[in-house]
Amino acid sequence: MNIFPEFKDKKIVIWGFGTHGNGPAAVKFFSQNGAKILVTDLKTESDLKESLDEIKDLPNIEYVLGEHKESDFLNADIVFRSPAIPREVPLFKFIKDHNIEIQMSEGFFLKYSKTKNVIGVTGTKGKTTTSTLLTEIIRSQGLNVYQAGTPGNSAMDLVSKVNEDDWVVLEVSSWDCEGLDENQVSPHVGVITNISHDHLNRYASYKDYAMSKASIFKYQKSEDFFVTIKDGEFTNDYLQISKSKNILIDVISGGYDFSGSILKGEHNVRNMALCFEISKALNLDLQKTKDAILNFKGVPYRGEELSEIKGVLFVNDTAATAPVAAISGIKTYLDRNPVVILGGADKKLDYSGLVNYVLETKVDYVLLKGTATDIYISLGLDSNKVYDNFEVAISCAFNIAKNKNGIVLLSPGTASFGMFLNEFDRGDKFKDFFEKLKNEN
């Protein structure tokens, strides 16, 4: 079904096909609209098998896998870039120097989608929880709403699908924000949940990373909304750029009462407050909003309470991939005697705050082997608590928790690479072993 005739017979290069769904979704979109497609990725065919299976029956597709060749890009009308590919790679400059259009999924969606009822959510942490809660709130109002931007939910799947009156809640990473810059587009409501040190292996500085988020509101008009935390470290920098209606959340003096909510922790009070203020700005029914907030069960991988084994609760907080997120996780469960599973791969972050917090609170912990774990140890954590086997680490944490009437909390404070494919793979393996332990006990 060719809804966008402007792409018929155009040469589209999918640069970085990937395993998270954006690549296949982009291929499907351009194939449906009559384009000629070249898929290229540094990964091999076997690495990408699951994603490639999704598009195996589509016509007009060529593949160059295991390498990127400049010649494959020269005649492209559009290069569709994976967010995992940094702008700093030489091939990016080569494409730009040849005046070839570069697109990414979120920016492409905002440019071509029929609906302008889009809420874009970015920030260091809280994106998925806030996005999912906003989706539930809008659905509670009887409105048709889609959620995109999370793994497996590509915005490209929605470009042809959504109608003018539909709502879309779009989760946007700092890398995805670069795609908004390509088209100079921002959503009707732009949200920054919070900013803390993260991804400094990809950005020149902490401020460079923080300001990458500004695309979520930078291109808004006066009738649009920018929502963020009042006392955020970069809020004043953002306000100097914003041309839209600014809504600043003050959690402490805002008088928010979410007692009875299933969500735990100060960070989730902030997420709920953001959602409540967005509802007010959009003139939604606030009682329905409040009900949706109080009934919201949270999302997988983020403070996800699995269940108990012999009185020990297991909590899957694998999405805590930065120190500040791990501190939030520990703080949330501090009164439950947590045994925390920490450690993994380094992202060039400052881990001293997390290590100091662990030492000050005297929480029990086990460590997963990795480059960040080496830094934890240099800062004062115990090298005798390092495990290179995830199941053994979980078992050890379980045994400690049993003896102190505690809980097992996976909240690593680091990236997952090395032992795992990604943080979700880490979380899935945690769940799998939990089920195994449960059956044994």
Image: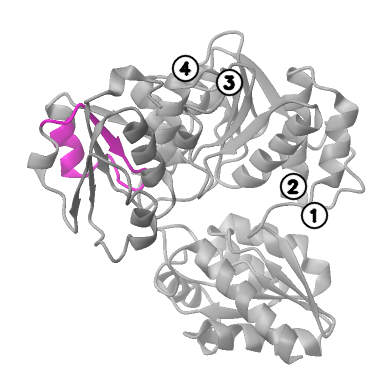
Distance (Cα) linking label 4 and label 2: 28 Å
Whether residues under marks 4 and 1 lie with C-beta atoms below 8 angstroms apart, the answer is no
The reply to whether the C-beta atoms of the residues labelled 2 and 1 are less than 8 Å apart is yes
* Mark 1 neighbour class, 10 Å CA radius: few under 14, some 14 to 19, many 20 or more: some
Magenta segment range?
A: 75-95
The answer to whether residue 205 is visible is no
Q: In the image, which disc is placed on residue 163?
A: 3
Which residue type does callout 3 highlight?
A: Asn
**Quarter of the image holding residue 166?**
top right
Q: Is tag 4's residue or tag 2's residue first in the polypeptide sequence?
A: 4
Whole-angstrom CA distance, mark 4 to mark 3, is 22 Å
Q: Residues within 10 Å of mark 4 (few under 14, many from 20)?
A: many
Residue labelled with disc 1: 264
Label 1 sits on what residue type?
A: Lys
At x 33% / y 18%, what residue is drawn? Answer: 5
Image quarter where the N terminus lies is top left
Q: Identity of the amino acid at label 2?
A: Asn
Q: Earlier in the sequence, mark 4 or mark 1?
A: 4
Whole-angstrom CA distance, mark 2 to mark 3, is 32 Å
Where residue 338 appears, as percent x and y from the top left, is: 74, 74
Residue 76 forms part of the magenta stretch:
yes
Q: Is residue 406 visible?
A: yes
The reply to whether dot 2 and dot 3 touch (C-beta < 8 Å) is no
Which residue is under mark 4? 219
- Circle number at residue 166: none
Q: Which residue is mark 2?
A: 268
**Please, what is the three-letter code of the amino acid marked with disc 4?**
Tyr
For marks 4 and 1, give the CA distance: 34 Å
Q: Nearer the viewer, mark 1 or mark 3?
A: 3
Who comes first in sequence, dot 2 or dot 3? 3
> Are circles 1 and 3 on residues that touch, CB within 8 Å?
no
Q: Please say if 329 is above or below 229.
A: below
